[in-house]
Image (tube, rainbow, N blue to C red):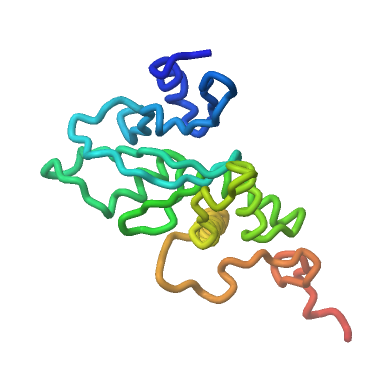
Amino acid sequence: MLCRECAVRTHLDNPFHQVEEWVGTYFKRRGLQELGLVIRLGHGGDVCPCAKEPVSMTVTHVNGIHTCDIQFCGCFPLGKYNSVEAPVQLANAGLWPASYKNPRTVSTFHAVREYNQFSLQAKVNVMDYNRVKLRMTNNAFRDDVPDRYRQLLTSHRQFMFLQTLKQFGAGVQDRYAPGSLVVLCPACPQPGKNMDPSWKDVPA
């Protein structure tokens, strides 16, 4: 049992934990945003001297969907906040934005990777995965939870595409050569790789 200030302080490194408040007769689930927790980007979680006002964002995590206050670092040229840098700050904090301009919905790297494993192993689609997160957040009143199905779908596509680029050592560009992001089949004959160097001299 912790007071409001101690609960916020002990959850600075775990901002997506689901806490409950004793209201006299039962424990009521409360969001850490309601208790005053602010996720600060940059400076190792400390207050940025040029920080802007916190922005309320919807976060999809492995344990449900949360509403959090996120404060961007304002240490940019001329001390002005540049919206183009917002996705970079979020990605550095392990949060993948659903949009590049003025992001208001993010998914944690853990959630995106978890869905990717469910998709590969159990063939779960994004809609069912999102419904599970809605139930984990509020199983009795799912309509009270913000539904971010489309944003999660976009986030997963973008994130896994960049993961593919990283695995193949390809930089981000407008066009890619055909077959540049394809794994070669080890069973298919590839001259110079898995065939006899003198294969052309072999009789028909």
In the rendered structure, the answer to whether residue 92 lies left or right of residue 82 reads: right
Residue at figure coordinates x 58%, y 24% from the top left: 27
Say if residue 169 shows up in the picture.
no
In the rendered structure, the answer to whether residue 144 lies left or right of residue 63 reads: left
154 vs 150, nearest the viewer:
150
Residue at figure coordinates x 42%, y 45% from the top left: 91
* Residue 99 versus residue 204 in the image, above or below: above
x and y percent of residue 8 in the render? 41, 22
* Residue 46 versus residue 136 in the image, above or below: above
57 vs 85, nearest the viewer:
57
x and y percent of residue 73 in the render? 26, 38
x and y percent of residue 128 in the render? 67, 57
Q: Quadrant of residue 201?
A: bottom right
Residue at figure coordinates x 37%, y 33% from the top left: 39
- Extreme front residue here? 25
Q: In which quarter of the image is residue 140?
A: top right
Say if residue 55 shows up in the picture.
yes
Tell me the quarter of the image containing the C terminus.
Answer: bottom right
